[in-house]
């Protein structure tokens, strides 16, 4: 009797092991986890059906992914409004930080657990598109007559390739100078001076002078003083946001482009111009703020906690950052923070103009419902709601107006960002090309070594340019 | 007839028991080790980006590996870490073990010693990341209060790797000491007594008795800590992410970068296979050289 039980146990364990081994096989992962979202939908279905009396079979839950925690409440409000209009569809908003988010989306596509609709980024979507993971929205757009001209100029075009559309714009951002009002006052620098400053890569122009004036050593001498001691700096004039990697979105792209640099020849270009001397002199000026002048903290200082933490910790007077960070700079600071225009470079004021969009994953079991949600999320109805939260600038003008009203109500002047966006030739687009996930690691390491003074900008950028362009061969 | 059948039945039953007992480990081995290993090996002959079907590329990944300067750099950085980590950690642990053996049998001290090891790696790395922060870290506040220049620690290419080694020595030395302490308990006290009657001093006893008789435990500790040391990843993932520049881009980080940043699974597994071969070789040499399976006590 006992031996029979033992034999049974053994047989069971062997069978179990074989089952588990089979699960490890190539085909199995696709089959298993799909049950999960459907089960989730089923458990949430009663709530939806009660409200609407729609047949249970039509109740669907859409999973919607985003990485910016600040926007989660806004999109949850949108989701509620959407469900009120479309009683059979519930939207579950899922948020994860930038790094985890992309890992989760990509591995989720393999294991069949990616969200139905997710916030997409210009550096990421071309690879998803080329790996056939995104639903072409063009047929839906044509069928439902969505007007893509409702979005701010150029935003919708960023999301198309070869006649297909992979996303509808949801928001945009520009870059501006962030300042610590107390430090400006003490140094006798006015906001007007800052707004009218000019910049060049040779000596930093009047903006460079302001940075020096705002840098103080332990004896209270500023960097314009002959007795300034750069080894005992207690207040930095400028806090760089790190080395900026391949695109320098908030770090150096505005300096470089206002100096006449261009990344490449536009959407899906197959060649980068990182070896442009105009970029090299810009990056060297940027690195020398710390390496030579001592008016900026080291890369090590910035990297661990981030420029934002150093700025709000009162370690420096100026930095540059994107409009999505407005809340972070104004919420938790003990001093008054303001936003000033980027300085005028040799080619004028230039800010990177970046936009996010929502995409639908091809593996979604509910593509029609996903489209309904995506259409709503990128329509004025939702973007006005998002705007009213004052966390980001929506992609349609009425949403922008709502955001401006929200910021004004909070007493925050954000015109430095909006003026940049509406100025003629005030912006350039985020460089969208293939191989972004490989360009990133290459340029990160090289830009770091330039910032640390281990390589000159000319040498480092030449090396980076060769490696990056080799990817396209 | 019956006399023959009984033992055979008993033997069969015994075998069944044996299999039942081995089954959990065997299943674990098959599911979590054997199958993934074989799949990994197969994957290294392909070009797989996770989302599109894998393409067979033969030995292309291996050819590329041999001319990959970054892989060589990753190996060097890893070896640098292991050479800093293991000797200091083992010496320190041995010192602590001998001290405990001589002066204290306190379980509280033993408890304190393993405490860092009980903390999750991620927590340890985060705590030290904050303590060592260049601008706001506790340690730099002390350094500055003492009148010295603050140090970048994890933020400088020169200091990052020694700093990570120090963090992990802090975490593992106590645990290693406990293992060695247990080994010391197995050495009969009479041998020391006999030696001291013969007039041997502490130093002679340590190198003549303790070290040789501790060898099996020491080899076990060395083999496992060296393998663990080669697999350094979590501390780096939390603190430096392979940087600054590539100062801490160890083999495991390099594998991670290819697998989950660049999504080149084929090449990532190729590097894993290479690391596996290297570790097997090192372990084999260690076992061979140190005669791990025999003790001088026998």
Image: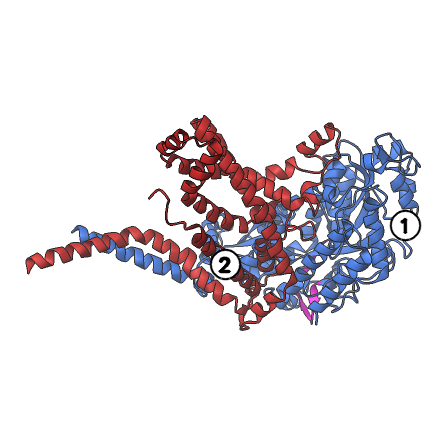
Q: Please provide the residue range marked out in magenta.
A: A159-173
Residue at the limit of the structure toward the front, as seen here: B198
* Residue A41 against residue B69 in the figure, above or below: above
x, y percent for residue B118: 49, 37
- Classify A471 as above or below A296: below
Provide the letter of the chain coloured blue: A
Residues beneath discs 2 and 1 located on the same chain: no
| Left or right of A174, for residue A224 | right
Q: Circle 1 marks a residue in which chain?
A: A
Res. B57 image quadrant: bottom right
Q: Chain of mark 2?
A: B
The residue closer to the viewer here, A87 or B164, is B164
| Horizontal side, residue A450 vs residue B215: left or right | right
Q: Main secondary structure of the magenta part?
A: strand
Find out whether the residues at labels 2 and 1 contact each other: C-beta distance under 8 Å: no
Left or right, A182 with reference to B169:
right
Local SS, label 2: helix
Of residues A204 and A110, the one drawn nearer to the viewer in this rendering: A204
Mark 2 Cα-neighbour bin, 10 Å: few <14, some 14–19, many ≥20: few
Q: Position of residue A52 (x, y in %)?
A: 51, 50
Q: Please identify the quadrant where the C terminus of chain A is shown.
A: bottom right
Chain (red): B
Residue at numbered disc 2? B276
In the image shown, does A427 or A237 lie closer to the viewer? A237
Judged from this view, the residue extending furthest toward the left is B1
Is residue A373 in view from this perspective?
Answer: no
Q: Which residue is mark 1?
A: A199
Residue drawn 85% across the image and 48% down it? A342
Secondary structure under badge 1?
loop
Q: Nearer the viewer, mark 2 or mark 1?
A: 2
């Amino acid at each position: 009797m006992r031996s029979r039980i033992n034999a049974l146990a053994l047989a069971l364990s062997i069978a179990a092991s074989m089952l588990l081994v089979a699960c490890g096989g190539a085909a199995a992962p696709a089959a298993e986890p799909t049950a999960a979202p459907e089960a989730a939908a089923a458990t949430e279905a009663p709530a939806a059906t009660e409200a609407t009396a729609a047949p249970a079979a039509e109740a669907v839950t859409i999973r919607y992914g985003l990485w910016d925690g600040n926007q989660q409440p806004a999109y949850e409000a949108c989701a509620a409004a959407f469900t009120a209009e479309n009683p059979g569809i519930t939207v579950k908003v899922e948020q994860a930080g930038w790094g985890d988010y992309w890992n989760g989306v990509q591995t989720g596509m393999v294991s069949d657990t990616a969200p139905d609709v997710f916030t997409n980024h210009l550096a990421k979507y071309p690879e998803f598109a080329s790996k056939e993971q995104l639903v072409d929205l063009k047929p839906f757009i044509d069928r439902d007559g969505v007007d893509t001209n409702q979005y701010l100029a150029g935003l919708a075009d960023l999301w198309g390739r070869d006649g297909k559309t992979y996303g509808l714009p949801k928001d945009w951002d520009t870059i501006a100078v962030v300042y610590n009002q107390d430090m400006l006052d003490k140094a006798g620098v006015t906001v007007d001076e800052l707004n009218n400053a000019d910049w060049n890569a040779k000596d930093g122009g009047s903006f460079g002078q302001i940075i020096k004036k705002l840098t103080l050593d332990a004896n209270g001498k500023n960097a314009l003083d002959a007795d300034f001691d750069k080894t005992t700096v207690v207040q930095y004039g400028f806090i760089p946001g790190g080395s900026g990697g391949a695109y320098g979105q908030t770090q150096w792209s505005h300096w470089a482009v206002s100096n006449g640099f261009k990344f490449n020849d536009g959407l899906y270009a197959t060649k980068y111009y990182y070896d442009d001397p105009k970029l090299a002199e810009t990056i060297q000026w940027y690195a020398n703020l710390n390496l030579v002048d001592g008016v900026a903290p080291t890369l090590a200082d910035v990297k661990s906690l981030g420029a934002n933490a150093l700025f709000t910790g009162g370690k420096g007077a100026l930095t540059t950052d994107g409009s999505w960070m407005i809340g972070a700079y104004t919420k938790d600071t003990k001093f008054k923070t303001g936003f000033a225009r980027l300085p005028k470079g040799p080619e004028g004021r230039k800010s990177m103009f970046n936009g996010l969009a929502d995409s639908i994953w091809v593996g979604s079991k509910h593509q029609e419902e996903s489209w309904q949600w995506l259409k709503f999320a990128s329509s004025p109805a939702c973007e006005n709601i998002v705007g009213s939260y004052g966390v980001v600038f929506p992609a349609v003008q009425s949403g922008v107006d709502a955001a401006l009203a929200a910021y004004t109500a909070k007493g925050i002047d954000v015109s430095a960002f909006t003026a940049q966006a509406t100025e003629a030739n005030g912006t350039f687009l985020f460089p969208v090309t293939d191989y972004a996930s490989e360009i990133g690691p290459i340029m990160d390491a090289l830009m770091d070594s330039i910032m640390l003074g281990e390589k000159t900008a000319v040498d480092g950028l030449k090396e980076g340019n060769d490696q990056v362009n080799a990817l396209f061969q | 007839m019956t006399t023959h059948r009984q033992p055979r039945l008993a033997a069969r039953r015994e075998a069944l028991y044996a299999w039942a007992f081995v089954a959990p480990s065997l299943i674990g081995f098959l599911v979590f080790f054997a199958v993934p290993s074989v799949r990994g090996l197969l994957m290294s002959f392909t070009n797989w980006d996770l989302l599109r079907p894998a393409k067979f590329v033969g030995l292309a990944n291996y050819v590329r590996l041999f001319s990959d300067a970054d892989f060589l750099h990753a190996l060097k950085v890893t070896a640098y870490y292991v050479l800093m980590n293991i000797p200091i950690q083992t010496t320190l642990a041995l010192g602590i073990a001998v001290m405990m053996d001589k002066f204290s049998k306190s379980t509280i001290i033993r408890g304190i010693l393993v405490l860092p090891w009980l903390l999750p790696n991620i927590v340890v790395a985060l705590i030290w990341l904050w303590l060592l922060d260049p601008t706001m870290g506790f340690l730099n506040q002390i350094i500055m209060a003492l009148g010295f220049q603050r140090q970048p620690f994890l933020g400088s290419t020169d200091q990052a790797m020694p700093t990570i080694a120090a963090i992990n020595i802090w975490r593992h030395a106590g645990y290693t000491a406990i293992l060695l302490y247990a080994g010391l308990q197995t050495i009969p006290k009479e041998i020391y007594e006999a030696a001291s009657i013969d007039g041997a001093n502490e130093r002679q006893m340590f190198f003549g008795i303790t070290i040789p008789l501790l060898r099996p435990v020491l080899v076990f500790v060395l083999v496992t800590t060296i393998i663990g040391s080669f697999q350094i990843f979590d501390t780096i993932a939390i603190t430096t992410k392979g940087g600054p520049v590539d100062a801490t881009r160890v083999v495991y980080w390099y594998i991670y970068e290819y697998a989950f940043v660049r999504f080149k699974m084929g090449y990532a597994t190729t590097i894993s296979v290479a690391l596996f071969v290297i570790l097997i070789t090192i372990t084999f040499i260690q076992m061979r050289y140190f005669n791990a399976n025999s003790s001088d006590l026998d």
